[in-house]
């Protein structure tokens, strides 16, 4: 491996240090990370393939699943390939522009994913509270427009982060103790006044999560009210089953997003290697489990996936 050691960092590069304190175990750590990535790719590509091939799945709910699958693929691809280059070959150098680009796409995809979870909650609200009007309220075209609005919002909110950082001077010591260019890790590399960058990053996180969780909470509050008005236990169970997959994915996504955002700001007491390892696992595990959860919980999708697997 020594033949692949990185060259000295130039004035326009950072060094991604992987998981500090566990450099000797990088090869072993790469095994679960590569497995998570492969499982995530296979599961999400399978969803995209099956939904695109099956005319009966060309519905709003499955269009949303495809959007979620694309964000899962994008989020993991932003992190894992570079991380594996660090683990396997010690390719630790990354240019400042590449680092800021990686940071932008990762954060933008995370913001897009939380917008999709809001649309999914609205989809469940309409399906349970207004089932007879579902096909007229939520068309594929309307879902696509809502997805575009979520994408535009994500770009507009996240784009200022790398633009502000690009204008700041960076210190001589440019070693980032992480596997990827996380926003706060890059901010700490600057020798300039980072108050605005830190504040904007925190406010953006709180605005995105606060607004989206409020909308999701409102949707589920209306769903619970509608369900409680029905006396049938069977109807209660059916309504709960339609929401189970979304609730599981939502809990994993928001917990990982909050854990990553807040520990960099308030987790100074956590050991560096434990902190970095937990942050990256919290980010990657939900991306791997999302297609599995929806594949297991959504019968129509599960049957179609099973049909294609049997043909192989």
Image (tube, rainbow, N blue to C red):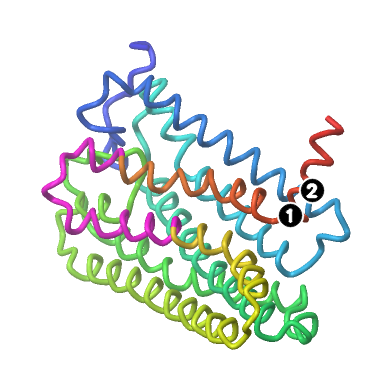
Local crowd at mark 1 within 10 Å, few (<14), some, or many (≥20)?
Answer: few
Spot occupied by residue 259 in the image (x, y as percentages of width and height): 31, 55
Q: Position of residue 9 (x, y in %)?
A: 27, 32
Tell me if residue 152 comes above or below residue 31 in the rendering.
below
Asked if residue 11 lies left or right of residue 76, the reply is left
| Magenta residues, dominant SS class | helix
Residue at left offset 56%, top offset 72%: 150
In this view, the residue in front, 275 or 4, is 275
Tags 1 and 2 touching, CB below 8 Å: yes
- Local crowd size for mark 2, using a 10 Å CA cut-off: few (<14), some (14–19), many (≥20): few
Helix, strand or loop at label 2? It is helix
Identify the disc placed on residue 303: 2
* Residue ranking furthest to the left: 269
The one of 110 and 270 positioned closer to us in this rendering: 270
Could you tell me residue 181's position as x and y percent?
35, 47
Which residue is labeled 1 in the image? 299
- First to last magenta residue range: 252-277
Rendered image quadrant of residue 142:
bottom right
Residue 264 in the magenta stretch? The answer is yes
In three-dimensional space, the C-alpha distance between marks 1 and 2, rounded to whole angstroms, equals 6 Å
At 81% from the left and 54% from the top, the residue drawn is 52
Circle 1 sits in a helix, a strand or a loop, which is it? helix
> Is 70 one of the magenta-colored residues?
no
- Place residue 128 in its image quadrant: bottom right
């Amino acid at each position: 491996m020594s033949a692949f050691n990185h060259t000295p960092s130039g004035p326009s590069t950072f060094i991604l240090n992987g998981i500090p304190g566990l450099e000797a175990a990088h090869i072993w750590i790469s095994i679960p990370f590569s497995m998570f990535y492969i499982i995530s790719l296979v599961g999400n590509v399978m969803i995209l393939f099956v939904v695109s091939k099956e005319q009966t799945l060309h519905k709003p709910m499955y269009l949303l699943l495809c959007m979620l699958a694309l964000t899962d693929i994008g989020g993991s691809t932003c992190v894992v390939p570079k991380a594996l280059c660090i683990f396997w070959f010690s390719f630790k150098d990354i240019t400042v522009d590449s680092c800021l680009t990686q940071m932008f796409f990762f954060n933008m995809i995370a913001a897009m994913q939380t917008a999709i979870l809001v649309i999914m909650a609205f989809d469940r609200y309409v399906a349970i509270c207004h089932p007879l009007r579902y096909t007229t309220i939520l068309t594929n075209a309307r879902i696509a427009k809502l997805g575009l609005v979520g994408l535009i919002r994500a770009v507009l909110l996240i784009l200022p982060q790398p633009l502000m950082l690009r204008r700041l001077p960076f210190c001589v010591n440019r070693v980032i103790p992480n596997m990827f260019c996380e926003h706060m890790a890059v901010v700490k590399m600057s020798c300039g006044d980072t108050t605005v960058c830190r504040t904007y990053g925190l406010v953006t996180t709180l605005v995105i999560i606060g607004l989206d969780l409020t909308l999701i909470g409102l949707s589920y509050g209306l769903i619970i009210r509608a369900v409680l008005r029905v006396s049938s236990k069977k109807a209660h169970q059916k309504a709960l089953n339609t929401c189970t997959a979304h609730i599981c994915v939502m809990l994993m996504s928001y917990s990982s997003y909050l854990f990553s955002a807040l520990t960099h700001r308030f987790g100074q007491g956590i050991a560096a290697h434990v902190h970095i390892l937990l942050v990256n696992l919290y980010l990657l595990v939900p991306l791997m489990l999302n297609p599995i959860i929806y594949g297991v919980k959504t019968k129509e999708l599960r049957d179609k996936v099973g049909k294609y697997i049997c043909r192989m």
